[in-house]
Amino acid sequence: MRIRALFLGSAACAALAVPAFAADLSFPVKAPAVAIIPPFSWTGFYLGGNAGYGWGEGSANWGNYLDYYYGGWDQYGSTGGSDPEGWFGGLQIGYNYQLVNNVVLGIEADFQFGSLDDRLDYTASTTSGGLTDTDFGTLDSKIEALGTVRGRIGYAFDRFLPYATGGLAWGNVKVSERWDTYYNGAYQPALSGSASTSETLWGWTVGGGGEYAVTDNWTLKAEYLYADLGDINWDSDAGTRVDVKVQTLKLGVNYKF
């Protein structure tokens, strides 16, 4: 009986000790999952709009042109020039591909519409046989639309992308003239008139800019371009051509798909 009582007592003590021992054991706890945010990528198509200001250099030998027609007159003078400038707005579409080394290659086409213009005013006068002939004229140079098709190369600093760009450029250029003739102050409609020519010129462009991704889909950009559009033939008799160059500075927004 003593042995049985001793055995039962030992078993009871062991049973009571198990919960206490189990309470002291530490079990591994699984750490909460950490969300991994993938790095931003510039790869993809995009579409956007822009607005900016352009200033041109429409170098033309207007002095030779006026000399050709008014060189024998008593006097003539001119003011102004043929350097069109003004505001514009437009659209752009393109595609970027980001390499594993963060170099970004892309292609973009844009179209701008607006009115970049400049005016040259001239006056010429001569007197013969008591009759004074006076001409008042204007020469207008205008870029009515322009656009580019360019390659882009940049380096991505996460959401900031500085880049260089270059390619083809085009512009719808119009040159026009209006002159009014007066004899001794009387308007002569038969001797007054106008002339104009318009061409779509093709040339080249280079520039650069920077783009920043505000969200995964929306980006903001600033860009500078220099474009040489070639020249437009204004007057073959006087050998007058208008060579059109233009610089643009614009801000834009893109939606990346």
Image (spheres, rainbow, N blue to C red):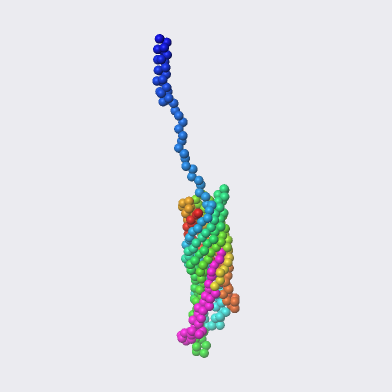
Residue 172 covered by magenta stretch: yes
Please count the marks in the image: 0
Q: Quadrant of residue 23?
A: top left
| Residue ID at (53%, 76%) | 196
Instruction: Name the spot of residue 206 as percent of width and height, x first.
Output: 56, 60
Instruction: Name the spot of residue 127 as percent of width and height, x first.
Output: 51, 86
**Magenta-colored segment: predominant secondary structure:** strand
Instruction: Name the spot of residue 176 as percent of width and height, x first.
Output: 52, 75
Give the residues in magenta: 169-197
Residue 195 covered by magenta stretch: yes
Q: Quadrant of residue 242?
A: bottom right
| Residue ID at (49%, 70%) | 117
Q: Residue furthest top?
A: 1
Q: Residue furthest bottom?
A: 129
Residue 123 visible at all: no
Between 175 and 257, the one lying in front of the other is 257
37 up-or-down from 52: above or below: above
User: Which of the image's four quarters has the N terminus?
Assistant: top left
Instruction: Name the spot of residue 99 as percent of width and height, x first.
Output: 57, 50
123 up-or-down from 57: above or below: below
Between 86 and 200, the one lying in front of the other is 200
Residue 70 visible at all: yes
| Residue ID at (42%, 10%) | 3
| Residue ID at (53%, 72%) | 174
